[in-house]
Image: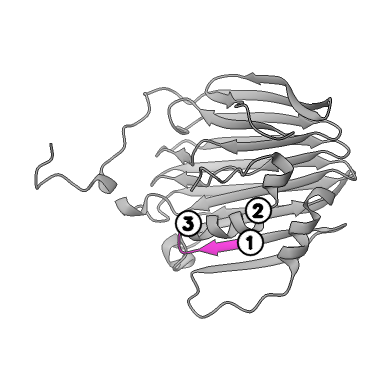
Amino acid sequence: MTTPSDPPAALREPPPPARRAGKAGSGELVFTRVAGRTVLEKALARSPLKLLAPKNHGQAAWVFVASFGGGLVGGDELNLHARVGRGAAALLSTQASTKVYRSPLVSRQRLEAEVQAGGLLVAIPDPVVCFAGSRYEQDIDVALADDASLVLVDALSSGRSARGERWAFDRYASRVRVSRGGRAVLLDATRLDPAHGALPERMGRFDALATLVALGPRAASAAEALLAPRPPPERRAELVASASPLRGGGAVVRVAGTSVERVAGFLRGALAFLAGELGDDPFARKW
């Protein structure tokens, strides 16, 4: 039962994770193409990292990354290495948004991936949600063979706006590096720190950011569509997107929206082709 003095559900504090010290978790994934399908040859995880590999339609293998405790506490460091073999196709995603809890200590995640000839890696985690007073850093490093392909999403929300925690974290830093045939094609870094100026004022009306990378022959159609000329955004538009070409074919798109749903809608449209590559729509039961 509730009483008139109870706060609305959206404003209630969610149950905190079990109290524990920050931990270092690690994982390793190997995707291999066998008899026309991609199989998960190796899946190793050390707590607090969890790896879930559901059965799915199509020829690709899917893995969802999670952590014990419902999010990252201060001092957590999660490191994942993935290898996608020749001609294989792999999806890396998350069950839900990555929540970063308040702490004076930094929480960190790192993904190192190798995609061999003809392979495809689709890394599309849900947005990171940094609670007030949290500190978070992530590193994404992907090495592609000359004819390998990559679809990557790096997304961030403003936090728990319903609790008055809009852009209220202490620090957020993300670095994405992509190389192809041993040559760097993308180095993208984002750092949001109140020490450089109040974040709510700097971010304006936008509550969600995302970077989308589409690179390689298996993502060529999406990259071409993203780079096509589009009309300029209207004044006070609820979503703004800007695309740039990558060396050797491909595109990187930066998106800002007034809500996670706005940004998610853009990403779903841009990545509709993935259902054919993966055998199912990875967004069907998300957002």
Relative side of 102 to 30, left or right: left
Q: Which residue is mark 1?
A: 254
Q: Badge 1: few (under 14), some or many (20 or more) residues near its Cα, within 10 Å?
A: some
Q: Is residue 287 left or right of residue 57?
A: left
Residue 224 point in image, percent of width and height: 78, 63
Question: Circle 1 — which element?
Answer: strand
Q: Callout 2 environment at 10 Å: few (<14), some (14 to 19), or many (20+)?
A: some
Q: At 53% from the left edge and 67% from the top edge, which residue is drawn?
A: 239
Q: Sequence order check: which comes first, mark 1 or mark 2?
A: 1
**Left or right of 10, for residue 56:** right
Q: What's the mark number on residue 102?
A: none
Give x and y (percent) for residue 45.
61, 20
Residue 287's place in the image compared with 80, above or below, is below
Q: Tell me residue 233's x, y (percent).
A: 57, 77
How much space separates mark 2 and mark 3, taking CA atoms? 16 Å
Q: Marks 1 and 2, Cα distance to the nearest angstrom?
A: 18 Å
Q: What span is colored magenta in the figure?
A: 255-261
Q: In the image, is residue 132 part of the stretch drawn in magenta?
A: no
Residue linked to disc 3: 261
Residue at the image point whose x is 50% and y is 30% from the top? 75
Residue at image location 9% in from the left, 47% down from the top:
4
